[in-house]
Amino acid sequence: MVVAGGTTVLASDCGCGGTVLPMSSSEPVVDVWSSEQVITCRDDAAGLRAVIAIDDSTLGPGFGGVRRRAYPSTDAAIAEAQRLAAAMTLKHAVAELPYGGAKSVIIDDGSADDRRLIAAFGRFVARTGGTYIPGVDMGTTLADMQLIREQGATAYCADENPSPWTARGVYAAMRAAVAHRLDADTMKGVRVVVQGVGSVGASLARSIAADGGTVTVADVDAGRAAALADELGGDVVDPDEAPFTDCDVFAPCAVARVIRMDTIGRLRCRVVAGAANDTLDTPECGPALAERGITFVPDFVANACGVIQVHGLEEGWDHDRLVAEVERIGTRVGEILTDASAGAITPLAAALQRAADRLAAARTTETKG
Ligand code: NAI
């Protein structure tokens, strides 16, 4: 396993087992053995080609979303399913959720009938006997999850948008990082650049502004960025310039891999903390950020509140319990940053170690049992 930025970290980096995948996301070389299980699903009548990757089931059934999009090749689809599944293993382990890591992708060539396609996929999910639990991801909806359920599969489709909770968790993570790096108890006067002001980014920006922070926003949807800046009394920057804008905190909340080795030298922030998965292009970006004195909050720690909320809804948690879980993300980030400082390692390494420890403890319990 896994995973930083479209890429896979050496197994020895996280101690979680698995193998090494190539660094380049442009030419994926598939290693099916880096996941516990990879299932290819074909139904010609429905026009379905899909991949289910279960990365690691140590902590429980593999839970992870169904991504539906076009892929340049079958290998690209398999590689993405595996990479995303591995990231889910880390996210669940650090968030102390009772799930393994999994993800699935439906290769969408635009020709299939939606309902037949999803129903056919649901039948494959049912065959996993609950060892894979799908949820919503890019290109799929709650109605799709309902249809998957109707095929006899377990699927999570509680009717509540997780994005506001993801934003709350990211904000808790950001505050913890600000306390650690800037030695600031509040966000008053803290300058934050939010790249991508969709569901998560806009909500995050509102929280920051409400607490007295200064917000600069960027979005490829210029109108959306301008409207939010207007609402919050903030500025707008060009989306491509967002990472290089002078600020205290850079919050990537749009696309993956915005922190790259060739541009790290241009960053002008002290903290990177956002929602976007796969923020680092390659694992070397972690040490390179640390060398520049920039504190990086690993995305799989900061953005976990979405899955925590989905789990909570399935478990019947009330609002107070969810709020407590948000706060735990902040506590966790504080601990990870302290561990990193104490061990002279990067926050990414400290977070990977935390995931590895939880997996190892679960394996030990399993062996004793
Ligand atoms: P969204 O689709 O609602 O918003 C993304 C925003 O980014 C849009 O406004 C879009 O116009 C903008 N955008 C796209 N490309 C951009 C670019 N190059 N530069 C600047 N802006 C750009 O997505 P959402 O739900 O807010 O998610 C944001 C990020 O957080 C994604 O990377 C997602 O994978 C991640 N995430 C979201 C979770 C959730 O609960 N929504 C949970 C965990 C991670």
Image (spheres, helix red, strand yellow):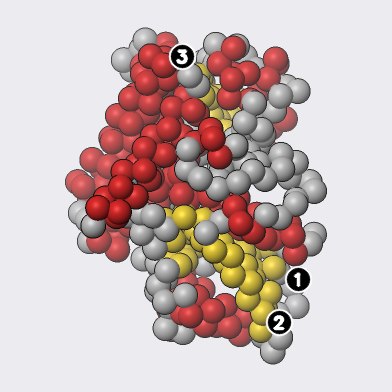
* Residue 109, numbered circle: 1
Residue 360 screen position, x and y as percent: 36, 43
- Image quarter for residue 288? top right
At 69% from the left and 68% from the top, the residue drawn is 107
The residue to which callout 3 is attached is 344
Using the image as rendered, state which of residue 238 and residue 318 is in the foreground: 318
Q: Please report whichever mark, 1 or 2, sits nearer to the chain's N-terminal start.
A: 2
Please state if 300 lies on the left or on the right of 99 as rendered. right
Residue 343 screen position, x and y as percent: 41, 16
Q: CA distance from mark 2 to mark 3?
A: 52 Å
Which image quarter is the N terminus in? top right
Q: Amino acid at mark 3?
A: Ala
Mark 3 element type: loop
Q: Indicate yes or no: mark 1 CB to ligand 1 under 8 Å.
A: no
- Is 326 placed above or below 307 here? above
Crowdedness near tag 1: few (<14), some (14–19) or many (≥20) residues, C-alpha within 10 Å: few
Crowdedness near tag 2: few (<14), some (14–19) or many (≥20) residues, C-alpha within 10 Å: some
Please state if 213 lies on the left or on the right of 215 as rendered. left
Q: Indicate yes or no: mark 3 CB to ligand 1 under 8 Å.
A: no
At 80% from the left and 59% from the top, the residue drawn is 72
Residue sitting farthest toward the front: 368
Mark 1 element type: loop
The residue to which callout 2 is attached is 47
Using the image as rendered, state which of residue 250 and residue 220 is in the foreground: 250
State yes or no: discs 3 and 1 in contact (Cβ < 8 Å). no
Q: Amino acid at mark 2?
A: Gly
